[in-house]
Amino acid sequence: MHAVVRAFSKQYRHAGKNEKSHLLNRLCRTIGYSRKHLMEILSNPPEARKRKKRIQQSQYVRIIKSLRTLWAVSNYACGKRLKPLLSSLIAALRRHKELVVTPEERKLLLQISPATIDRLLTHDRKRINIKGRSRTKPGSLLKHQIPIKTWADWDNAKPGFVEIDSVHHCGSSLNGEYIYTLDLVDVATGWNECCAHLGRGEYRTIAALDTIKGRLPFPLLGIDFDSGGEFVNYHLLRYCDKNHITYTRAREAIKNDQAYIEQQNYSVVRRFVGYQRMDTEEQLKLVSRLYELLSDYQNFFQPVMRLKTKIRDGAKVTRKYDKALIAYQRVLKRKDIPKETKQNLRERYKKLNPKRLLLEITGLGRKASKR
């Protein structure tokens, strides 16, 4: 009732005699108070009672420090990507004595939900939004000889069909020769490899592709690239024919045709190497070493979510993703990958320390960015 009185008190105090009488009659009928009592409380309305909030300490307070460590080692993955990674990440860090947790804390870490992870890390999360320069120039000589393949054609790809792109480390100036990164991602498994080379020459691009080809845990069966001149040339055409590699190209200026690799360009290359200009042999050695370590970190400790369905209802688009899995896990699940390859990957995984890898990668990135 006090809430009703407070709602009408201001109106009562500023009303005339007749209006006050009408208001009193109305309230008497509504709430049953006497006129005398109503006149008193409308002139001096009672203050609203402040409800005391019962502050209950979250059970996850005790694991927030460990969660921050795991989040940092995962390179600040979101809750939906971090949650499936926690079990293997905790095991890897404990194996290398980089993390100490009690059985109770481990249980809490494994039962925490993605939403709770994001909520607990709200104040720690910072977004970085940096834009770089595009340096892709279309090659025109062989366009009519290279078939176009769009994003929709990759739905049921098997391991070995990849998207590739060239990332330019030119900084703010496009003059002179500088370092390029050949970035590759396997569509079926999300396996990612990078190789740095100095200059944009066709032979160097092919040499970088050949280096990556030797690192893949499965045969290279097909490549899809944009219309850049480093890819649309006779040298790459002959290389693909010689190695029985299918080659296709994306449509010009349609980035969704290469959605997988365009995402990797930022989340992998730019995130660890940055946008600074790099044009020396010393920087090339540092970046090359960085990519060797990054291959282990990215493919064994970075979960990826794949788009399952995309439904458009007018202006509303609903996307559904599968469970976040590491590329290593996706390779192990494939029936078309030899058992020997899987066993080699398991042995390689056991030797890896994700925290040490990330520290070395970030250290190399800082050194390479200093000229």
Image: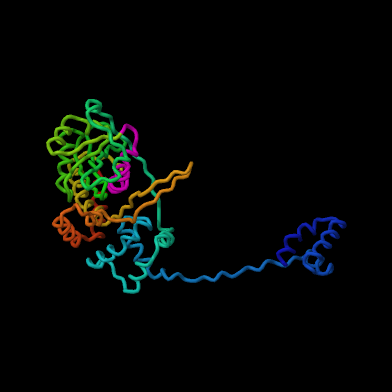
Residue drawn 15% across the image and 54% down it: 338
Q: Position of residue 323 (x, y in %)?
A: 34, 56
* 321 or 73: nearer the viewer: 321
Q: Position of residue 3 (x, y in %)?
A: 70, 64
The image quadrant that residue 312 belongs to is top left
* 369 or 236: nearer the viewer: 236
- Which residue occupies the extreme left position in the image? 242
Q: Can the viewer see residue 76?
A: no
Residue drawn 73% across the image and 60% down it: 7
How many badges with numbers are in the image?
Answer: 0
Magenta residues, as a range? 251-273
Q: Position of residue 28 (x, y in %)?
A: 81, 65
Residue drawn 34% across the image and 37% down it: 255
For the C terminus, which image quadrant? top left
Q: Is residue 72 magenta?
A: no
Residue drawn 80% across the image and 63% down it: 27
For the N terminus, which image quadrant? bottom right
Q: Is residue 263 magenta?
A: yes
Q: Is residue 127 above or below residue 3?
A: above
